[in-house]
Amino acid sequence: MGIAVALALVVVGSVVFHFLSPWWWTPIASNWRYIDDTIIVTFWITGAVFAAVVLFMAYCVFRFRHREGSRAAYEPENKRLEWWLAIGTGVGVAAMLAPGLVVWGQFVTVPADAATVEVVGQQWQWSYRLPGADGKLGATDIAHVSAENPLGLAPNDPHGQDDVIIQGDQLHLELGKPVKMLLRSLDVLHDFYVPEFRAKMDMIPGVVTYYWFTPTRAGTFEALCAELCSTGHSFMRGGVVVESESKRQAWLQQQKTFAQLQPPARAQARN
């Protein structure tokens, strides 16, 4: 009897804790409210199943408890129960998968007018690269990484000379403008994550991954690494500023291109 009551209290306590919990998402600042909705749908389905299973266990413990003079009857098959369980499980799995697949289809389909930003992760800092006047990012190769060329741009690629390089500073994005984030890592797994934007994707050495979002709220947001990249993982922080187009252009004018950051001797040799 006591075990049955304890199981029922586990369900009641879990539900009460959910509604009274002080922990919740940060206020959203992007177009990905669909991600929140999908998580909530999944949570309620799994929560309902959890409650049903535990309460059923409590019922069984109480209903079939030991009583003097009672003898258990062995009934190994119950076709009706098996069909209900199979159908219910199938419906539940479909209900959880369908919203996620819909959101994933939107997540990997980048709008044609999205701006491009490259984020480069390296223990324990973030760097950013923006297309220059030609609107194209130059080629990169890990073999080109050096103290003078930390992002590994190909020195002889003309498309990379006007690329804007940003290190140790906040990334500025335009409010209401879709942006495609190209993600690259120079060492280990990283994950550039701004909780208010919801969207994120792992950065895998040797592979360029991506995701996109549209900033919907102006402000300054903290970026962090959502992968356990090293012992200094918790210190790998950055920042994103979402602002109007005019303010972003003023900030952009203060940044330097790849060509401007090269030593004079290398720049003269290239010319």
Image (spheres, grey):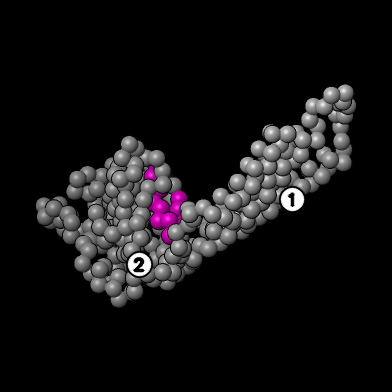
Q: Is residue 119 left or right of residue 101?
A: left
Query: Distance of mark 2 from mark 1, alpha carbons?
Result: 42 Å
Above or below for 250 versus 118: below
Q: Quadrant of the C terminus?
A: bottom left
Q: Is residue 13 left or right of residue 264?
A: right
Q: Quadrant of the N terminus?
A: top right
SS assignment at label 2: strand
Few, some or many C-alpha atoms within 10 Å of disc 2 (few <14, some 14-19, many ≥20)? few
Most foreground residue, 62 or 218: 62
Is residue 196 magenta-colored? yes
Which numbered disc flags the more N-terminal residue, 2 or 1?
1
Q: Measured from the top left, where is residue 15 in percent x and y? A: 61, 50
Residue 91 badge: 1
Question: Which residue type does callout 1 highlight?
Answer: Val
Most foreground residue, 271 or 43: 43
Q: Measured from the top left, where is residue 210 in percent x and y? A: 44, 54
Q: Which residue is mark 2?
A: 219
Q: Which quarter of the picture shows residue 175?
A: bottom left
At 66% from the left and 51% from the top, the residue drawn is 45
Which range of residues does the magenta coloring cover?
189-201
At 35% from the left and 60% from the top, the residue drawn is 221
Q: Measured from the top left, where is residue 211 in percent x and y? A: 46, 56
Is residue 230 magenta-colored? no
Question: Which residue type does callout 2 highlight?
Answer: Gly
Few, some or many C-alpha atoms within 10 Å of disc 1 (few <14, some 14-19, many ≥20)? few
For this orientation, the residue located farthest to the bottom is: 246
At 87% from the left and 25% from the top, the residue drawn is 70
The reply to whether callout 2 and callout 1 are in contact (CB within 8 Å) is: no
One can see residue 101 in this view: no
